[in-house]
Image: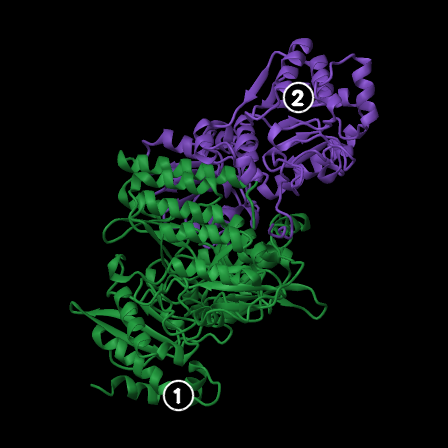
Chain colours: A purple, B green
Amino acid sequence: MLRSDFAPETDRNAMAQLASGGGVVVELPGDADWRAVGEQIRSAVQVDIRFASFKDGRGFTLATQLRTRLHYQGRLRATGDLIPDQARYLKRVGFDAITPDRSDLAADWAKAEQRFSVVYQPASDAIATITELRNREGDDLERLNARYRQSDALEILRDAIETTWRGRIALLSSFGTEAAVSLHLISRIDPATPVFFLDTGRHFAQTEQYLRTLTERLNLTNLRVLKPDAAEAREEDGDGYLWQRDADACCALRKVRPLARALDGFDALVTGRKRFHGGARTELPVVERVADGLRVNPLANWSAEQIQAYFQTHDLPRHPLADMGYSSIGCWTCTAPAYGGGGLRAGRWPGQDKTECGIHAPAQGAAVRPERK
Amino acid sequence: MYRYDEYDATLVRERIGEFRDQIERRLDGRLSEDEFKPLRLMNGVYLQLHAYMLRVAIPYGTLNSAQVRTLARIARHYDRGYGHFTTRTNIQFNWPALTDVPAILEELAAVEMHAIQTSGNCIRNTTADPYSGAAADEIEDGRPWAEIIRQWSSLHPEFTFLPRKFKIAVNGAAEDRAGLRVHDIGLQIVRDALGQTGFEVWVGGGQGRTPRLAVKTRDFLEPRDLLSYLTAVLRVYNQHGRRDNMYKARIKILVEALGAEAFIAEVEEEFEAIRDSELRLPDAEIARIRSFFGTPSIHNPAPLPEAGEPGFRHWLKRNRRAHRVDGLSSIVISLKPIGGTPGDATDEQLDIIADLTARYGLDEIRVTPEQNLLLPHVHNEDLHPLWLALKSAGLATPNAGLATDIVSCPGMDYCSLATARSIPIAQAIAKRLEVAGLSEAAGDVTIKVDGCINACGHHHVANIGVLGLDKRGEEYYQITLGGAFGKDAAIGGIVGKGLAGDDVPDAIARILETYLQLRRGSETFIDTLRRTGADAFKEAIYVAQ
């Protein structure tokens, strides 16, 4: 009944043995006491556990105990009054095969078996649990970061785009003052790499002009302009002054949600963030997990001088506003020139505590929630 | 608060797909009603007297404002404009169409909620002390453990077709506000001699037809062994719990039949065998889950407001609870307006509550087993504006913990199991006591009303319990006295023959009047009752007859 690729070696052996006329089949009722059947199943090549009713779950524990306490390794088959919705549970507790009384629902059984891709509990099928995957991924990220520590930005990007997240990675660019560096690096590897630009509807005309200049110059062929949902924008920002009332809500509408929608189908997103930007970026790793997936920050450890040098070496055009004191550029509504120190991003959301728009929000809530504003 | 990662979200999404498919198969006949029933129940869908009912899980009673807003929207679009909070800190919608349920589940999933295992013979939503993270008497926050149990118990391959339902509660404070003694498994966080925390485990409590208090099965369980131990208990129960009689199928009957000692020996044998398996919780995972929970810290603690309208001061006195952090208060939002339906909130009220949760509550609100809501963390300087806002929404009834703060099951007005009405009785009692000024005069006392012996309204553990029954088509009500829910848990005793519904409010009033005559000093109702015994109270109940 179940798909053939789920029959393990023991199952095939048992079948062969049975086909040749050797081996014993033992049938147990679902309510059998596992402690009492050790002798009975010792020489069995197949044990059938019969479920009197699909609502009687004793057979699930019986199968578990045969596999884990009695170490029974032969073929284990579930028979009786079973429903397709139990396919996966049966498989998980150690059954190799299922022969339900009602035999006309093969398609439903096959579908039910494939229904879930993740599990919380360890069971006889030895599938990696969510807990294991979480901790394993932590290790993976650590290994990847260790490897990338030995690499320069071009090598990191080449590995990320061509190998590690091939076909599932994009670059997010602000087309701001430093953006030309990662765009140029990408163009050297594969100009068809998807490049996301968040068109908030509030950008400086100079940024839009710069976007056209760079796209053309670097021959980028996969630019994707992400706009806020029109209906949401009407509802939440009818008068266009949301940025004044609640900058966080405005970023959520114009940046966070459009990006979240675009990320469907992508596992990782390359950003141009650098540690010297300061604030929350001081500890930026090369690869990190954030709320909606992975971020790859190949320029994390670059200095301002390295960026200037890269512009010169490759003769890259500058953002038209760079000479006017703007060191970091977002929407015109919330960006000022960063005069008088305070760091490169001092001109973003001037006069507010806000330093980030929220598109790279961390993966976990902090231990203690921040105090209300 | 816990936030889903992609694994949690994936599982909930796939579960919705499964339920959608199950409805489809029921409609085209591939699933019989007998097969569909346990499947829909395991997704919280009941068939009630008038319509389908959907019970939505609120894990350990914790919600944020976005989640409350979604509940408001569901009440508005799919129900008749209200939702009902339950004694197990979930919420029920009474009028959804079956075919709308998948769409409702999609809305819930968008705010990291679901209806998984809110009914059926499986492990139900795990509850915890509603004051977790806020209580002054807290030993350790129980919510991370409740979340670990939520994940482990979701779609469990071995324990989804149990003999009967299975309820687990976690309490991390000195006082037991989760009702551990009346749960299938109660986990009390304790400290050992070295200051390490672990669990004291209670098994085999329950209410319903055969109320039993749990027995202690373990003095100390290492936290990392939690899931191994729970698995051992469930495994013993799944094999040996009765399946021939649904009224004797709960684990309390098994514990009683085997005897505590034999039951514990069986569990320990299994536990030892699996203790070092993959069930052992990795430290990193415990730390990860813990990182989502905590107690807020504040900078400039403001003192409690001393001035204000008499109504405000009165509300503060009744509905405010001390917080472990100086400058913060916990506030009970009473869902017991006099004459209202206990535990109901309208869509408009839910929207207002969502706003207030975001504005004054550090974006966190709890549901309590008393069918009220609780803002655990409110800055003292916000108490007055909060009160004004609650008052204008009809949510500032100053009766938390009083006689009019009555718990009631839905009873005959909704439930297909009910043998009598419960909501109208609760309403009549509250009105009678309020008019006589008895609610305020009698102070802390618990009154709980049930419309059948299944005891969803927890009448067994009420100081004053009311149980509605049916005798040849006539409703009548049994009064119980002396029940308690916490550390001193007790099952109330039946006082005598049942009363007609109309006589119940006066009988309750006379019980409270008797207490006021008998009490000494600062005794509460239950103190006096325990000192004097029930005789004088019984006499008062039947005096008029």
B167 lies above or below B321: above
Q: Quadrant of residue B90?
A: bottom left
Residues tagged by mark 2 and mark 1 found on one chain of the structure: no
Q: Closer to the observer: label 2 or label 1?
A: 2
Q: How many marks?
A: 2
Real-space Cα distance between discs 2 and 1? 80 Å
Type of residue at label 1?
Gly
Position of residue B250 measured from the top left corner of the image (x, y, whole percent) = 40, 62
Q: As drawn, is B167 to the left or to the right of A197? A: left
The residue indicated by pointer 1 is B533
Residue B510, relative to residue B84: is it above or below?
A: below
User: Which chain does the residue under circle 2 lie in?
Assistant: A
Q: Return the x and y of residue B521 as percentages of the image width and height.
A: 48, 89
Image quarter for residue B496?
A: bottom left
**Residue closest to the eye, A121 or B441:** B441
Q: Which residue carries the number 2 mark?
A: A175
Q: Amino acid at mark 2?
A: Phe
